[in-house]
Image (tube, grey):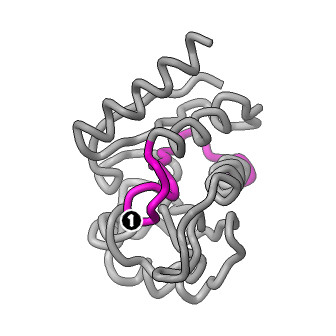
Amino acid sequence: MEFAVVQGDIAEQEADALVNAAGTSLRMGSGVAGALRRGAGEEINEEAMAKGPVDLGGVAVTDGYDLDCEYVIHAAAMPHYGDGQATAESIRDAARNSLERADDLGCESLVLPALGCGVAGFDLAEGAQIIAEEIDSYEPASLADVRFIAYSDGEYETVEGVVDELREA
């Protein structure tokens, strides 16, 4: 499946669904979760936590509230905060489950961050490779516009480089 690499704040994206880089508790703390919570309002954190905990690699869906999306898919690529780091398997599962849930919801557009990287402690280049492979190999039912988002210049350059290598292979 074709997808784009974009740079920006996920909370400012417009799509049918945005993916939150969550821990298994679904408590929305810092990083991507903090940006989405600030953009959506505190209700999103309350709804997410009421749906948790989820298994590592699992997902839960909430309303988008004040974000420019219908849904937020909370993908648990890492254990509850402080209980360990993300793994290649948890990142792969969280990415695949996010894509599948977006399709199940009939979404045409999805914005996905570098799950399990950053505060979760997984290497960005390796994590981006796993996520890009999952997006690239996914056979969508309804998804047509998938964006892999990076926040900072450095993060964007890393993700874009990984995706370029994948496309050249």
Can residue 48 be seen here? no
Q: Can residue 120 be seen in this view?
A: yes
Q: Is residue 104 magenta?
A: yes
Q: Residue furthest top?
A: 168
Q: Name the residue under label 1.
A: 119
Say whether residue 92 is left or right of residue 149: right
Residue at x 59%, y 67% (from the top left corner): 76
Residue found at x 68% / y 70%: 56
Query: What residue range appears in magenta?
Result: 103-124
Q: Where is residue 18 in the image (x, y as percent from the top left)?
A: 48, 54
Which amino acid, by three-letter code, is at mark 1? Answer: Val
Percent position of residue 36, x then y:
36, 65
Please say whether residue 38 is one of the residues in the magenta stretch. no
- Between 124 and 138, the one lying in front of the other is 124
The quadrant of the image that shows the N terminus is top right
Report the number of numbered marks. Answer: 1
Seen in the picture, residue 101 relative to 125 is either above or below; the reply is below
Q: Residue at x 54, y 40 (%)?
A: 109
120 in relation to 24, above or below:
above
x, y percent for residue 75: 59, 63
State which quadrant residue 143 falls in. Answer: top right
Q: Quadrant of the C terminus?
A: top right
Residue 62, image quadrant: bottom right
**Residue occupying the point 46% across, 39% down:** 125
Left/right of residue 44 with respect to residue 156 in the rendered view: right
The kind of secondary structure element at disc 1 is helix
Q: Give x and y (percent) for residue 29.
A: 37, 77
- Label 1 packing within 10 angstroms: few (<14), some (14-19), many (20+): some
